[in-house]
Image: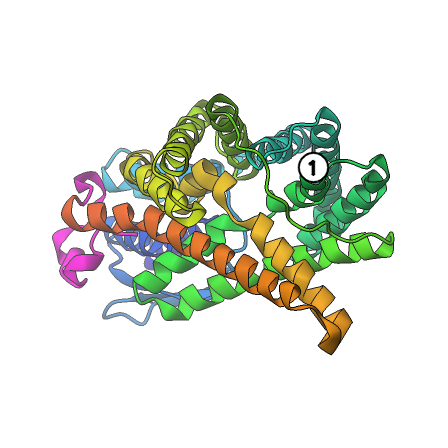
Amino acid sequence: MTRTEALDTVALAAKLLYKNGQTSQRVVLAVERLGHALSLPLTLHLSWSELALQVEGMPYSEMVGAMPLGVDMGKVLGVMRVIDQVCEGKLPPEDARCAVEVAASHYAPASTPRFALFAALGAAALGVIFGATEAVSLLLMAFSAGLGALFRRWLAKVSENPFIQPLSAALLAGVVAAAADRLQLSGAASSLTALCPCMILVPGPHILNGAIDMARARVAIGLPRLTYAGLLILAISIGLLVGLEACGAALPPAVSSPGVPFTADVTAAGCAAAAFGTFFSIPWRLLPLPIAVGMLAHGARWAAISFAGADVATGAFVACLLAGLVVAPVADRLHLPFAALGFSAVVSMMPGFFLFHAASDLSELVSIGSRAPVDLLIGIVSNGATAFLIILAMTFGLILPRMLLSRFLPPASRRLPTQVENKMPGFMQGAD
C-alpha cells in the first residue's frame, strides 16, 4: 500500500467507529494500532465534528468530517474485527479498506417491523417497572411507542436533522396520551401513558460517552456529547408538552405507585434491555447478553430498595455498578461499544419519569407566573434533583468498573505496540 492508501483506510475505520458510538479512547487506540500495522505511525485527534490524523514525522495528514450522532454496535463490531485481523497478520494490508467497507455494510440496522415491535415492547416494559397494572394503559403505551417508531423511521428518510425524530415521536406520544385521557385511567397509569413512549427516546449512550470523556479530561469532546444529549432531552420534553397542550390536556401529576413484584420487575427489565439492544443494532446472537445483565442489575436494584431501604439513586448506583463489572470485560472481549452495551442493560433506570415531570412543572410555573403555588416549585426542585442524582449514580456506577479494569487489567489482546503505547500516560492505556 502507498501511504496515501493506508491513510485513507485508517481514516475510514476511524470515521465508522467514531460516528457509530465507540468510546473516544477506544477509537484512538484502535486507529493508532491499525496505523502502526499499516506502517503508518500516526496520532488521532478528536473533535465534535471532525477527526484529524497526523502522520508522525511526515507531511501526510488528513481531516475527516464525522459527528458521533448514532449508535450501531454491529458496525463497530465489524470494523474492530477487521482491525484485529490486520494487526494479527490474518488479513493482508492491501485488503484492509475493502474489508472495512464490507464489514460496515454487512450489519444493517434493525428492520422497520422489528424496530417498531421492540419499541412497543420497551414502552410497555417501562410501564410495568414504574407500576402500571392496567392492561389498557400498557396497550396504549405499546401502541404509542410503536407508532412513534414507525414515524421516526419515515422521518429519517426525509430529514437528517437529529432532533426532528425524537421531537416528533414525543409529540405523537403527547397526542395519544391526551386522547387516552378520556378513558379516565388511574393517576399513575394516565401519567405513564404519556411518559413511557418518551422514556425510550432518552439518549443514554451519549450521556455515558460524554461522562467517560469528561472523566478522562477529554473536555473538548465530552462537553459537546453531553450538550447534544441535553438538547435531545429538551426536544423530547418540548414535543411531549406541545402534544398534550395541543389537545387541551396536561401531564397528570406524579403519584406514588404500589411496589412492583420482583418477578414482574426483573422480567420487564429484560424486555426493556432487548428493546434498546434492538435500537442500537445489537446482532441477534448477542442480544441475550444485555437482557441477562439487565435482569441481574434490576434484581440487585429491587433488593437494595426493598430490603435495604435504599433510595432510587442508591439503588441505581448498586445496579449499574454490578452491570459495569459484567459489561466492561465483555465489551473488551467482544469489541462492542461499552456505553451502548451498558446502557442497553440498565436503560430502564434512566430518570425520564422525573425529567419530564420537572419539565412539565417548569412550563406550568412559567404559565402561572408569580401566582404559582409553593408546591409547584418544590416539585420542580425535587424532580430535577432526583433525575440529576440518578443520572450521576448511573454514570459513576457504570464507568467506575470500566476505568478500574482498564487501569489494572488492560486487555492484552488489544494493547498497542510498545512504541505507540509509550506515548500515552499509563492511566490511559487500554482504557475507554
- Choose between 398 and 187: the one closer to the eye: 187
Location of residue 56 (image quadrant): bottom left
Crowding at mark 1 (Cα within 10 Å: few <14, some 14-19, many 20+): many
- Which amino acid type is marked by label 1? Ala
Image coordinates of residue 42 in percent, x first then y, are: 28, 62
The answer to which of 379 and 25 lies nearer the viewer is: 379
Residue 428 shown left or right of residue 214 in the figure: left
Instruction: Tell me if residue 123 comes above or below residue 431 in the rendering.
Output: above
* Quarter-of-image position of residue 41: bottom left
The quadrant in which residue 92 appears is top left
In the figure, is residue 9 to the left or right of 148? Answer: left
Residue at 39 percent across and 58 percent down: it is 211
Residue under the point 62% across and 35% down: 127
Residue 181 percent location from the top left of the image: 82, 41
Circle 1 SS class: helix
Is residue 258 visible to us here? yes
* The one of 264 and 150 positioned closer to us in this rendering: 264
Of all residues shown, which one is farthest toward the bottom? 370
Measuring 66% from the left and 28% from the top, which residue is drawn there?
A: 117
Residue 98 visible in the snapshot = no
**Horizontal and vertical percent position of residue 205:** 47, 49
Was residue 184 drawn as part of the magenta stretch in this picture?
Answer: no
Residue receiving disc 1: 189
State left or right for residue 245 relative to residue 345: right
Q: In the image, which residues are magenta?
A: 410-432
